[in-house]
Image: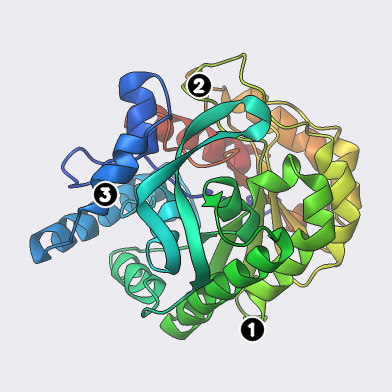
């Protein structure tokens, strides 16, 4: 009998209500929109207390436990400490202004909001946050915890550059900050590190021109015993079940695949559940393990085990079994907790059935 396909998650998970901070996904559920500068402004005045730290550890243990109980092999901490996974990173850097936000239209007009501004040279002048955050989560997990970080283009996509006017130079400075966190994670014993670059799917020219170099800068010095993953998806809608959302063209994966396959990392994470790929794409990844998005993260309908298993069987016609990992399309933060758990159970059952 073949070995069960391994399973993981991508990042976010619905936050427990008792946490002292909220996030963009809470805004989407409560208000029907992720246009949430109030979340950004609200977090700016926040200072963590010892009591809050205990709540974050409790939340990490809780969401990791739910993932593991559903059958996930490599969980995350659900990004429970973050108002969003991008700005949390930026708050630990110099050069960012979270007080005077800038209005911007993003993602081909699909989204607009007020964003933190870059008003000076970006650098990492503080102690890395990832060492503590990972250690606190791993201490309450029965499984190895994957830690997630935003990539340079992703940070650029959700901040307003009022200083550089030079995208490659800004990307290089941001990559240096991500690399510092990665090396801190390695030092803390983390063996699964992922950074996310959804804008690669919308900004293919930038990805090819300087984004790929950013990947190498981010992973510089990370040893081969660490599993290094890059996540590229086609984007979140503004709210659950928004079928009119203008996602990126999945054909972008085909333009990127050859170059991505040659870079020195281990896993490429792509979505497939929201809009099915031409599975011939998987044959373009000759050297990479593919984390294959198998349940939708922005639809309330719960997939069946058989439909997910059927798609996985089809995928295995194009990639070796030992290079396929099963995951949701993206983070689960937009879903309710109940939906997230049920989708993970279906996903893991399908991975075991194939």
How many numbered marks appear? 3
* Mark toward the viewer: 2 or 1: 1
Provide the residue designation for mark 3: 43
In this picture, residue 216 sits left or right of residue 176: right
Q: Please name whichever residue, 319 or 162, is drawn nearer the observer in this view of the structure.
A: 162
Say which residue appears at 54% left-offset and 68% top-offset: 192
Label 2 or label 1, whichever comes before in sequence order? 1
Label 3 or label 1, whichever comes before in sequence order? 3
Q: Are marks 2 and 1 in contact (CB under 8 Å)?
A: no
* Mark 1 Cα shell of 10 Å, populated few (<14), some (14-19), many (≥20): few
Say which residue appears at 23% left-offset and 60% top-offset: 57
The CA span between labels 2 and 3 is: 33 Å
In this picture, residue 343 sits left or right of residue 351: left
Query: Which numbered marker is on residue 285?
Result: none
The CA span between labels 2 and 1 is: 38 Å
Q: Are marks 3 and 1 in contact (CB under 8 Å)?
A: no
* Mark 2 Cα shell of 10 Å, populated few (<14), some (14-19), many (≥20): some
- Quarter of the image that includes the C terminus: top right
* Mark toward the viewer: 2 or 3: 3
Residue 48, x across and y down, in percent: 17, 61
Quarter residue 28 falls in: top left
Looking at this view, name the residue that lies furthest to the left. Answer: 51
* Mark 3 Cα shell of 10 Å, populated few (<14), some (14-19), many (≥20): many
Say which residue appears at 34% left-offset and 29% top-offset: 27
Position of 301 relative to 258 (above/below)? above
Provide the residue designation for mark 1: 223
For mark 2, give the secondary structure: loop
Say which residue appears at 12% left-offset and 63% top-offset: 49
Provide the residue designation for mark 2: 302
Residue 183, x across and y down, in percent: 52, 81
The CA span between labels 3 and 1 is: 34 Å
């Amino acid at each position: 009998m073949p070995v069960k396909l391994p399973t993981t998650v991508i990042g976010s998970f619905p936050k427990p209500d008792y946490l002292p901070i909220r996030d963009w996904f809470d805004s989407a559920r409560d208000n029907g929109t992720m246009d949430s500068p109030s979340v950004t402004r609200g977090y700016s005045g926040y200072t963590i207390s010892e009591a809050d730290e205990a709540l974050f550890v409790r939340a990490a243990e809780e969401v990791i436990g739910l993932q593991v109980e559903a059958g996930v092999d490599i969980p995350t901490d659900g990004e429970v400490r973050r108002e969003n996974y991008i700005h949390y990173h930026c708050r630990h850097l110099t050069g960012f202004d979270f007080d005077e936000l800038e209005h911007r239209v993003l993602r081909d007009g699909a989204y607009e909001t007020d964003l933190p501004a870059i008003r000076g040279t970006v650098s990492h002048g503080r102690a890395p946050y990832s060492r503590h955050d990972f250690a606190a989560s791993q201490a309450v997990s029965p499984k190895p915890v994957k830690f997630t970080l935003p990539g340079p283009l992703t940070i650029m996509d959700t901040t307003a550059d009022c200083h550089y006017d030079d995208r490659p130079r800004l990307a290089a400075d941001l990559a240096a900050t991500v690399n510092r966190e990665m090396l801190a994670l390695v030092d803390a014993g983390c063996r699964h590190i992922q950074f996310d670059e959804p804008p690669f799917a919308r900004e293919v020219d930038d990805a090819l021109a300087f984004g790929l170099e950013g990947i190498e800068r981010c992973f510089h010095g990370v040893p081969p015993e660490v599993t290094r993953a890059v996540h590229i998806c086609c984007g979140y809608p503004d709210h659950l079940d928004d079928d009119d959302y203008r996602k990126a063209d999945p054909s972008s994966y085909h333009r990127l695949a050859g170059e991505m396959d040659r870079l020195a990392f281990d896993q490429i994470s792509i979505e497939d559940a929201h809009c099915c790929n031409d599975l011939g794409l998987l044959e373009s990844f000759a050297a990479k393990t593919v984390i294959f998005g198998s349940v939708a993260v922005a639809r309330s309908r719960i997939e069946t085990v058989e439909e997910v298993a059927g798609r996985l069987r089809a995928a295995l016609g194009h990639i070796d079994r030992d290079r396929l990992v099963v995951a949701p399309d993206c983070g689960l933060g937009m879903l309710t907790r109940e939906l997230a758990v049920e989708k993970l159970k279906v996903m893991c059952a399908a991975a075991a059935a194939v």
